[in-house]
Image (cartoon, grey):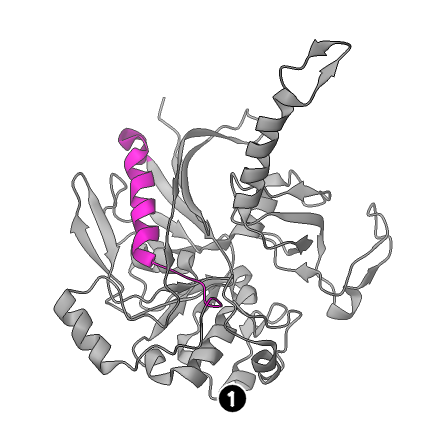
Amino acid sequence: MASRCVTLGIDLGTTSVKAALLEAAPGHPSGFVVLASCARAAQAEAESEVAGPQGLTAQADLKLKMLLPQPPRLLGLQGREQDVNRIIQALNECLTALPQQQLQKVRAIGVSGQMHGIVFWKTGQGCDWTEGEAAPVFKPRAVSHLVTWQDARCSSEFLASLPRPASHLSVATGFGCATIFWLLKNSPDFLKSYDAAGTIQDYVVAMLCDLPRPLMSDQNAASWGYFNTQGQSWNLEILKVSGFPVHLLPGIAEPGSVAGRTSHSWFEISKGTQVGVAMGDLQASVYSCMGQRTDAGEFLRSGSLQASSQVLSLCLPFMASSQHKHLGATGSLHAFRIPADTDPRPCSPSRLFPILRQNLSGGGSIAQWGQCAGHICPHAGSVDGRSRSGC
């Protein structure tokens, strides 16, 4: 009997990178089985500055630094950036640890990752494909640091000076478009060094498929700000009036669609393998918990799988922004009140919008809480004179 197709799933989180091999299993409750998985700590935190491209030779890097303006010293502890080289190294380590014979069966690749952040690169120079010790790999080349969702360089005064977006989401520091506006004001020559941008997961998809222009799902686009989810389009006119470099905005693709095919063999994965457009980590985790489109409930996004701990209250069809604050009973849904700062974002692949509250503490906080509980439980006391051995 012919073997079933295997899918490679990748998640590029803030603190770790994960990969899993899945095989369709029609008789299984989830519809699939996990053949193998691996996680590696990214350890990618980098000094906060407007960074030059990575992966260059020392001589080329020095020459480029002479051409670029000195990084602004305005960031201090507010800037949060990550080294893309280290993220890709962690990804390569994950794939190296997976069974190579199973990688040969991979017929599709799905990628998700941390939202809001932005990385810049030069088209055609974003990476170098090399023969690794055991397999072909790609390494970042003319790529900036990743400015993450945790970045706080945009002050409230700066954000107030930006044009109002035509979107259900306001713009916050750490959002891709806000970061571009900040760079446009404080280091405009830095932006001239690049002609492409995306989230870290968009970058990986673009490198795997050698895309001439990066593609971005509406999920990640909404997380950047200045994106209209109903019209599925950027606020181009608003941005152009402000001098925003709109050429840096990726093309938009439907979540669940194919972004392209691998342009090289990658480890044991064949050239020409389908790669899906990158999804947001939130939407990917929500969709994995939904047995049906009508499912609603509370899901705790734990640090073992996702980049940040967030409590999802409900998943429901999109509604006008004026309806976000108060929702009455709709069908089988119970009436409840949603605070004004609640964040509805596109939920793929159906047109559902998760409504959530988030503490933005990072998934590591949940992992630390679990470790702490594990240490405390054996010493939590006794019942009827008998010592507890665990929780």
State the extent of the magenta-drawn residues as a range: 77-105
Q: Nearer the viewer, residue 283 or 191?
A: 191
Question: Judging from the image, what secondary structure is the residue with disc 1 in?
Answer: loop
Find residue 334 and report its horizontal and vertical position in percent: 85, 48
Query: x%, y% of residue 100?
Result: 27, 32
Q: Nearer the viewer, residue 104 or 176?
A: 176
Q: Is residue 391 above or below residue 264?
A: above
**Residue 245 in sight from this viewpoint:** no
For the C terminus, give its image quadrant.
Answer: top right
- For image coordinates 46% across by 84% down, the residue present is 244
Compared to residue 69, the image places residue 276 above or below, namely: above
Which residue is more in the foreground, 337 or 105? 337
Residue at x 35%, y 56% (from the top left corner): 204
In the picture provided, is 376 more to the left or to the right than 141? right
> Toward which corner of the image does residue 186 lie, by quadrant?
bottom left
Is 59 on the left or on the right of 70, as rendered? left
Tell me how many marks there are: 1
Asked if the magenta segment contains residue 82, the reply would be yes
Which x, y percent locates residue 36?
Answer: 40, 30
- In the displayed structure, does residue 5 sit left or right of residue 380? left
Residue nearest the viewer, comparing 313 with 85: 85
- Residue 256: give x, y in percent of width and height: 50, 52
Which secondary structure class fits the magenta region best?
helix
Residue at the location (37% across, 53% down)?
A: 44
Which quadrant does the N terminus fall into?
top left
Q: Is residue 112 above or below residue 190?
A: above
Q: Which residue is mark 1?
A: 242
**Which residue type does callout 1 highlight?**
Ser
The reply to whether residue 243 is visible in this rendering is yes
Asked whether 360 falls inside the magenta stretch, the response is: no
